[in-house]
Image: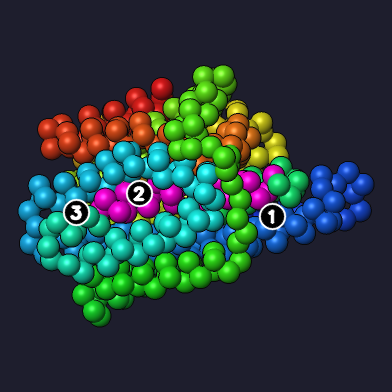
């Protein structure tokens, strides 16, 4: 069954990607081209410049993720302490992340991305320790780094795109391509991490991640220019600018609330899907690697669907539809009981929505969020997200799985 889901998802992804490329290929004879050749070349160059570093960084992130719990389990840490380490990362991101984003606006987004690499390198090196305080410190550092990962990289790209006066439609295409390529990178990174872990032990993937982070640091340092929000503003004044922008434009507040609710559900889903399948009626061992690969292919499928339908559907309608379908998909999991087939239908549909969500939300933030406080604003959005995930993690043992899926459904429907 699981192999069938993977094959069907891969075939659907290939067909949709082919259709999207065919539809979006410009007609050279058309006189109504949306951008000049110079603009198209500039957008393509900037896209390659950004993706060359961004995908290396995401590969480093994907390489360490699947083996974090396994590493702590092999170290003999009790489940309560492992949960505390995970919670530390979310709390650190919520507490320190806003300040990290606003500092990046003032001191430079490139510097913010380089700081991320340094923080994650230190956090990964901490995984080679057996001391709980050092592991704890590593999660504090990774929490701050995560905030920079989800703000400074996107803020740098949007600022450069706008500063070079490139075609706005090209920005949506860039985020769509990033989501698609990120799915491929995640599959390759997980395979490499598996090989490293099998050969050298459960800490080896974190060493591989360090290598990629160093490479990403070099690429960013050598190929990116610097851009800023408001260079003269202090951390507190940047936060004040972000709060004022929220007060003046309800659309920014709506976008931030939507981001917190969707991504909160997504992070909760990460903790729920494997537990749900392990308790299902499937006879035999669950092939978690195949399930994970299926999810990544579905994200790629969602990204390709975005490229296909974006020229046909206004962004706000497309975004609303994605949220509605995501809520429906989580609703299926609520009533799945122990049926593995229905769980997979639910999970596959939700992952397709994730592939659509990322380019939708990235494009919308690029339009709405002021340049002067872009990184800080994006990290403000992550505060309620981290609170939601932390609350759920604290209650995960107190409620049945179907109720947690119902909470996710309500968050998405809101």
Q: CA distance from mark 1 to mark 3?
A: 46 Å
Q: Quadrant of the C terminus?
A: top left
Q: Viewed as shown, does residue 360 lie left or right of 290?
A: right
What secondary structure predominates along the stretch shown in magenta?
helix
Q: Viewed as shown, does residue 87 lie left or right of 131?
A: right
x, y (%) of residue 28? 87, 56
| Between 6 and 226, the one nearer to me in the picture | 226
The answer to which quarter of the image holds residue 331 is: top left
Region of the chain picked out in magenta, as a range: 139-162
Q: Please, what secondary structure does the residue beneath circle 3 have?
A: helix
Q: Above or below — where is 313 with respect to 302?
A: above
In the rendered structure, are the residues bearing label 1 and label 2 in contact, judged by CB atoms less than 8 Å apart?
Answer: no
Q: Residues within 10 Å of mark 3 (few under 14, many from 20)?
A: many
Q: Which callout, 1 or 2, points to the residue nearer the camera?
A: 2
Q: Please, what secondary structure does the residue beneath circle 1 have?
A: helix
Q: Which residue is mark 1?
A: 21
Q: Earlier in the sequence, mark 2 or mark 3?
A: 3
In the rendered structure, are the residues bearing label 2 and label 3 in contact, judged by CB atoms less than 8 Å apart?
Answer: no
x, y (%) of residue 355? 50, 46
Q: Which residue is mark 2?
A: 144
| Between 172 and 97, the one nearer to me in the picture | 97
């Amino acid at each position: 069954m699981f192999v069938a889901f993977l094959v069907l998802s891969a075939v659907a992804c290939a067909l949709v990607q082919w259709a999207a490329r065919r539809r979006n290929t410009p007609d050279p004879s058309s006189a109504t081209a949306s951008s000049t050749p110079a603009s198209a070349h500039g957008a393509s160059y900037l896209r390659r410049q950004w993706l060359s570093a961004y995908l290396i960084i995401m590969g480093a992130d994907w390489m360490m993720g699947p083996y974090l719990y396994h590493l702590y389990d092999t170290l003999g840490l009790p489940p309560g302490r492992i949960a505390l380490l995970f919670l530390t990362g979310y709390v650190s991101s919520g507490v320190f992340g806003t300040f990290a984003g606003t500092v990046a606006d003032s001191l430079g987004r490139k510097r913010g991305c380089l700081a991320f690499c340094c923080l994650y390198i230190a956090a990964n090196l901490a995984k080679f320790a057996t001391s709980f305080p050092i592991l704890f410190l590593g999660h504090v550092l990774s929490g701050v780094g995560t905030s920079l990962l989800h703000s400074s990289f996107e803020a740098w790209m949007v600022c450069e795109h706008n500063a070079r006066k490139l075609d706005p439609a090209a920005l949506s295409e860039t985020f769509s391509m990033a989501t698609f390529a990120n799915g491929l990178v995640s599959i390759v990174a997980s395979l490499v991490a598996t090989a490293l872990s099998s050969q050298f032990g459960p800490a080896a993937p974190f060493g591989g991640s360090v290598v990629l982070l160093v490479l990403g640091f070099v690429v960013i340092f050598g190929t990116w220019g610097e851009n800023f929000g408001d260079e003269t503003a202090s951390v507190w004044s940047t936060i004040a600018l972000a709060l004022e922008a929220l007060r003046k434009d309800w659309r920014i507040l709506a976008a931030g609330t939507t981001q917190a609710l969707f991504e909160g559900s997504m992070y909760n889903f990460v903790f729920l899907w494997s537990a749900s399948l392990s308790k299902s009626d499937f006879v035999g061992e669950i092939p978690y690697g195949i399930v994970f690969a299926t999810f990544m292919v579905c994200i790629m499928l969602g990204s390709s669907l975005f490229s296909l339908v974006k020229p046909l559907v206004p962004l706000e309608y497309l975004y609303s539809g994605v949220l509605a379908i995501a809520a429906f998909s989580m609703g299926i999991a609520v009533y799945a009981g122990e049926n593995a087939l229905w769980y997979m239908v639910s999970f596959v549909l939700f992952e397709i929505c994730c592939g659509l969500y990322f380019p939708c939300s990235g494009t919308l933030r690029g339009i709405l969020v002021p340049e002067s406080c872009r990184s800080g604003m994006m990290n403000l959005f992550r505060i309620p997200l981290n609170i939601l995930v932390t609350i759920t993690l604290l209650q995960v043992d107190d409620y049945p799985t179907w109720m947690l899926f119902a909470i996710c459904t309500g968050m998405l429907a809101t």
